[in-house]
Amino acid sequence: MKDGAEVRKKNGVPVRLKTLRHFEVHHHPPRMFGFKEWTLICDALGRGEQSIILRKGGIAEGRAGFRFQHDEFLLFPTLFHEQVAKLKLPPTTPLPAPRSDGQHEILSRVRVEWTADVTDWEKVRSLAPFHLWQEPEVEKRFRQDEKPGVSLAFIRVAKLGEPFVFPDSPRFGGCRSWIPLPELPAATVATDVLDDATHRERESRIRALL
């Protein structure tokens, strides 16, 4: 991770300007895991419009349910066709078309800054301004089993310098959140989609609701 700053003079006084932080994958990067999420949510995260993930878990998550198992991962978009109807988007919003060559394309890397298990429905409802899911979809997840609640992650999203493209594989299927991915190319760089001030201000507003 690199931090940079540019120094300029304002009225003769040096002023230090903050720049966006960068992630840099080492020459021999560890194998990254992918986190499966609806493609339109991935788009919102990648544009900096959303900084939280809410999850309850898929049928393959095991008896313990869903957990944010990895501090850093890649967003793996899924083309769930009914997702527009479950999001706060115009009904005519188009889904991105799959690649014509059948390969997968990943655009964003994520770092989890903190997580919380939220078991108070009113607190979950209060998070509505900070995500795209419609309330019925969030409540369905909240009440999915005998233990009401959702897992929340507050995340920092970084856009890859170039799309990470790789072939499809049977291991990417199934109702599971985490999937092993091929290694990122060496020296892959990604840039945070939000500056520090905007990111921390959003974090403060979300923490105040929990």
Image: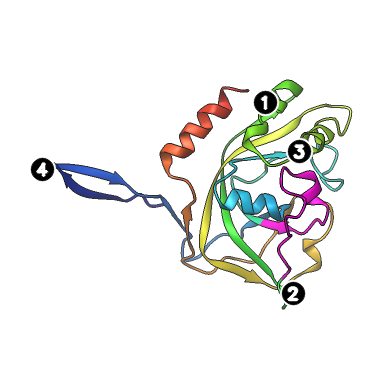
Element at label 2: loop
Residue type at mark 3: give it.
Answer: Gln
Give the number of the mark in front: 2 or 4. Answer: 4
Element at label 4: loop
Instruction: State which region is magenta.
Output: 76-98
Q: Nearer the viewer, residue 157 or 182?
A: 157
Left or right for 210, reference 186: right
Residue behind mark 4: 12
Quarter of the image where the C terminus is located:
top right
The mark that comes first in sequence, 4 or 3, is 4
The mark that comes first in sequence, 4 or 1, is 4
Q: Residue at x 76, y 38 (%)?
A: 134
Residue behind mark 1: 126
The mark that comes first in sequence, 2 or 3, is 2
The mark that comes first in sequence, 2 or 4, is 4
Residue behind mark 3: 134
